[in-house]
Amino acid sequence: MTIFVFIASLLGLMALGMPVAFALIGCGITMMFYLGITDPQIVIQNMWDGANSFPLLAVPFFMLAGEFMNAGGMTRRIILMAMSWVGHIRGGLGYVAVVAAVIMASLSGSAVADTAALAAVLVPMMRKAGYDVNRSCGLIACGGIIAPVIPPSIAMILYGVTGGVSITKLFMAGIVPGVLMGVAIMLAWRWAIGHDNVQAEPKRTMPERMKATRESLWALALPLVIVGGLKFGVFTPTEAAVMAAVYSLVVGLVVYREIQPSQVFHLFYRAAETTAVIMFLVSAAGVSAWLITTANIPQQLAELVQPMMDNKMLLTFTLMVLVLLVGTALDFTPTVLIMTPVLMPVLKQAGIDPVYFGVLFIMNNAIGLVTPPVGTVLNVVCGVAKIPMSGAIRGVMPFMVAQTIVMFLLVLFPQIVMWPLQMMLR
């Protein structure tokens, strides 16, 4: 009955049009009355505790780094570098989108920002070259959702803080699955454009390629510095976020000189706006998380899946299907914040590595960004490309299926995630 009260109150408030953060608070208050708890200070206290975490300081700094990268020309140079190497291949602009998406994912960690930047540059070019615009937008959207999987990832920070999991290990474990997501949609793209009559970009000369690569070196160096620093213990994920923001600002101001001093305040303001939304959700989820534990919902869930507790693979598969369904109705951040405290005790009881599960969980939620009816990233690409949602849904299907297959392959072969992690942390 407690699970029913929790789900019914949350979904009911959201169905009435209440913003997710307020729905979480309302759900918490409903649970309090159901459990006979009437102290209103609990709400404020848990909202404060939910956001009062040092690792969460990484969120505003990574958001700031993303703003500086886009405004400072780092994103554009990565796209031009990818185009110089693979743009001339048949369907080359699609491969450019994926290569650029993987590299940009290692810079910003924001699916929405990466998708918007890629779509703004590549969709007009793909239209002009004769590519199917719906399919092109679908590919760019699925390229954008690689960002939460490859470090630095804001989503992994939220999962790590909420679930008490090592963020450094999550970052390291996400590299190979993120690259596999990119490879999967490249293969799907090659199949999808098999009979299309599209124009290839002119082949660049080697000097042109080297010039484009040299110009993007400042951007390419950042992920190497972050991953290397985390691996060798030079800095924590939070300190890495600060370094990424400072590095991006210096490159944009001094090296590329595309950020004007007058723009800096506006970029800070935009990053603060996005951070405020995320942190308010985190605070609101703190109330629900405390009441989830108080109401013993994880134990009730564990009893429901008890027959699968001895089979880790079957349990992981079942939970992935559950998360996939939830992801079609809830946005990324609320799903992570709501489901992590529910699932974490079940994982520990079943003996499933929370780092391994966290990577699959984040992948699953990332795929939810391109599934209707919510599909935040789909909405972004539709807005930039000015196409209807129905067209984007048709275009995204082959790529979304390819990434979903990768996710379930990682359920069957967990060593693909864990072995590289063990090698990187030696």
Image (cartoon, grey):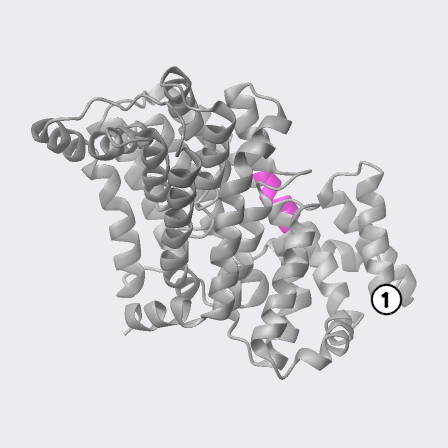
Q: Inspect the magenta stretch and tell me whether residue 40 lies in it.
A: no
> How many callouts does the rendering have?
1
Q: Which residues are magenta?
A: 276-282
Label 1 CA crowd tier, 10 Å (few <14, some 14–19, many 20+): some
Q: Which residue is mark 1?
A: 2
Q: Amino acid at mark 1?
A: Thr
Which residue appears at 31% of the width and 61% of the height? 230
Horizontal and vertical percent for residue 66? Answer: 40, 37
Quarter the N terminus occupies: bottom right
Q: Nearer the viewer, residue 406 or 179?
A: 406
Which residue appears at 11% of the width and 33% of the height? 210
Tell me which corner region of the image, top left, top right, bottom left or bottom right, holds residue 376. Answer: top right
Horizontal and vertical percent for residue 298? Answer: 72, 72
Q: Is residue 319 visible?
A: yes
Horizontal and vertical percent for residue 164? Answer: 54, 68
Q: Along the horizontal axis of the image, is 261 left or right of 51?
A: left
Q: Along the horizontal axis of the image, is 280 left or right of 169?
A: right
Horizontal and vertical percent for residue 344? Answer: 62, 70
Which residue appears at 60% of the width and 48% of the height? 333
Q: Nearer the viewer, residue 254 or 145?
A: 145
Q: What secondary structure characterizes most of the magenta part?
A: helix
